[in-house]
Amino acid sequence: MNILIYGYGEIGKGLYELCLMLKLHVKVVDDCIPLALVGSKSCISLSALDAGDIDKAFVCNHNAQIAKKMQDRLLKIGIDKQKIKIFNEVFYKRSFKKILKKSFNHTQDIANELLNNTDDFIESMKKVKQEYFKFKDKQNLRDAKRLREFDALGLNAFATMYATKALSNDINCILYPGFSVGCSGGKDLEFHFMDKIDFLALSKRPKDLKLVACFGDSCMQGDYLQENHRLTYLLQKRLGEGYKVLNFGISGFSQYEQMMLYNALVYPLKPEIVISLFMGWDFFNYVSCDRLAKEHKILYNPFYSEIPYRQLTHSKRPIPYKMQYTKAFYRQKERDNLEATVVRLEQFRNIVESAGGGAFIAIMRAFLWLQKEWQVKKGYDKDSFIQRHVEKFYQAKKAFSSYPYVYDINDIMPKNSASLYCDGCHFNELGNNLVSDWIYEILRRKKLVC
């Protein structure tokens, strides 16, 4: 038996899915929707329809007047009126399938009633819908109870799902809408900041309390140091009362990711000062997709995007990050990465300073291996992995030299500064003390602090 569905809106789509479930031979016609969207060989235009091949035609439209016009078109091309039935309400959805099958002894019984006793079938479907909604009500009550149990954890929806994940895997981040965060040992279990931040209280802060929002990677986060040795702690101590320094550092965050984090969580707070520590992960050219960097100016940390997505999709595509120490492996042009960093840094500044926002300060990270004495001591030659990054850094320094809001920590580093580092790129307490004093002087000279 050949079935025609005329009208592929919500009603027609439901009927089409039912016919597929019943394994009926069906054709679909619609005057408005491009039939390619249906994605099936069942689609046909009304002009190409052979009325003699149609055993049953279902007109599907909520509007009775439009449905009547559609029926008239079918009559005009020669389809017998006795074969036409108008449906003006949704009577089937895929979610009804289980209950529908329980209401009939066999699948063939459903098809027979649909085609031969359509009015009876519609009444049967009304009962199916009632049973389905009763089932959903019970299910919703159970889910509401479970949801209250999850909400008792005191976390947002995404942090709760991460904390209660059923699968044991290596995904070490939470994928929020529009941004992601790495899961570290911080006190905050929602965004994994080193300190729990009361966003609601800060949005209602007194006018004499100024917010200093600090963004960056592991150097800003300071998860490798005890609390009173971190840069944000020492800067808070230096600024004193009247200022609240917030640590939004996340290990490995690029300039782009810092900006996305600011947009998502910090923009509504309108901090008086925003400090961005950059040229960390976004400084290296093996961490991002070369096309995203070149064409869209997107640089990212693979740990919070590429690697977890590869795990979720079970893709076999190699991760460039894992090839970082392969001497010949440089996927991207340094210029593309630098251009992407410049674009996103300017965008970050514009967002911060717009609509009543505060001042924006960008700080280029310091690296011990920029110092020639350290390179000689370690025995790195001009062709080494380290030396390539030294050259890239000075290219970046030159590019940012005309930006009045960009400062380079390396300018204040003594010639022999190994005692200020935990390793080649992370400051210890002594280094952070030096940097916090330097940042304070920058803010003071700009008259951003008293």
Image: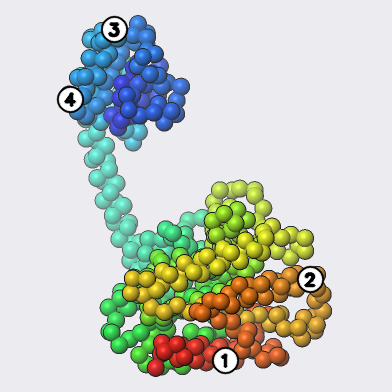
Q: Nearer the viewer, mark 2 or mark 4?
A: 2
Quadrant into which the C terminus falls: bottom left
On the image, numbered disc 3 is attached to which residue? 78
Query: What type is the residue that disc 4 sits on?
Result: Ala
Q: For this view, does 370 lie left or right of residue 20?
A: right
Q: For this view, does 84 lie left or right of residue 316?
A: left
**Res. 368 visible in picture:** yes
Residue 14: percent from left, percent from top: 32, 29
Q: Secondary structure at mark 3?
A: loop
> Going from the N terminus, do you reach mark 4 or mark 3 first?
4
Residue 363: percent from left, percent from top: 54, 79
Q: Alpha-carbon distance for marks 3 and 2?
A: 81 Å
Question: Which residue shows up at 45% across the image and 87% down it?
Answer: 446
On the image, numbered disc 4 is attached to which residue? 64
Q: Nearer the viewer, residue 353 or 262?
A: 353
Quadrant into which the N terminus falls: top left
On the image, numbered disc 2 is attached to which residue? 384
Looking at the image, do the residues carrying marks 2 and 4 touch, with CB atoms under 8 Å apart? Answer: no
Q: Alpha-carbon distance for marks 3 and 1?
A: 89 Å
Query: What type is the residue that disc 1 sits on?
Result: Leu
Q: Alpha-carbon distance for marks 1 and 2?
A: 30 Å
Q: Alpha-carbon distance for marks 4 and 1?
A: 78 Å
> Going from the N terminus, do you reach mark 4 or mark 1 first?
4
> Going from the N terminus, do you reach mark 3 or mark 2 first?
3
Question: Which residue shows up at 47% across the image and 91% down it?
Answer: 445
Q: Alpha-carbon distance for marks 4 and 3?
A: 21 Å
